[in-house]
Amino acid sequence: MLGRVHWLSDRLIGLSAIVGTLGLLFVVAVIVIDVVGRNFGAPLYGSQDLITMTMVIIVFGGMSLCDRDGGHIVVDIFENAFSPRLNRVIDVAAALLGAVIFVLIAWTVWQSAQLSLLLNLATNLLRLPTAWFQYALCVFSLITALGMLLRAVSLMLGHKAAGAA
């Protein structure tokens, strides 16, 4: 059962990373088109809207992959002073706390998206509905929370953490 959940989690993490990568490529293309257009006196209309909204996809799309691969900043100044058991407890607690934080982020942004729909909020120039991007942030946050929860379970079962020596 846990293996199947890990398989699904890995696929969701991979998908969110691909979406984040596509967002990054899109932003690079928009910036290049905008800069070249400015040289010819015709900048890309709405480039700021496109870049700003796509940054949500870039950052939160890659968050779960960063967590799975152990890419978050870790300060291990007391790790050698603690027993391996205490270090494992700290790692489990950190993963669980991270999962709770990302669920709370998703919940808060979900409520904000509901308000955005109610007020019909959109970007300034292109009038892109902000709720779409808020919903994407919710999905990416929940994928990250799932990955952190699975990491906590794996650590509790005795597996080594990603990025551990």
Image (cartoon, rainbow, N blue to C red):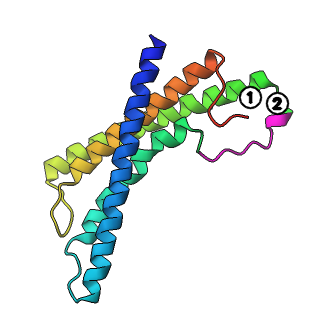
Among numbered discs 2 and 1, the one appearing first in the sequence: 2
Give the SS element for disc 1.
Answer: helix
Is 68 above or below relative to 71? Answer: above
Q: Disc 1 designates what residue? A: 87
Question: What residue do we see at 34% from left, 45% from top?
Answer: 137
Q: Quadrant of residue 92?
A: top right
Q: Is residue 57 magenta?
A: no
Q: Disc 2 designates what residue? A: 82
* Horizontal relation, residue 8 to residue 53: left or right: right
Q: Residues within 10 Å of mark 1 (few under 14, many from 20)?
A: some
Coordinates of residue 34 in the picture (x, y in percent) = 28, 76
Coordinates of residue 42 in the picture (x, y in percent) = 20, 84
Which one is nearer the viewer's eye here, 92 or 16?
Answer: 16
Question: What residue do we see at 27% from left, 50% from top?
Answer: 133
Quarter in which the N terminus is drawn = top left
Residue type of the residue flagged with mark 1: Asn
Q: Which residues are magenta?
A: 72-80
Residue type of the residue flagged with mark 2: Phe
* Horizontal relation, residue 50 to residue 108: left or right: left
Is 16 above or below relative to 145? Answer: below
Q: Is residue 77 magenta?
A: yes
Give the SS element for disc 2.
Answer: loop
- For the residues labelled 2 and 1, say whether their Cβ atoms are less than 8 Å apart: yes
Q: In 3D space, how far apart are the residues under numbered discs 2 and 1 (Cα atoms)?
A: 6 Å
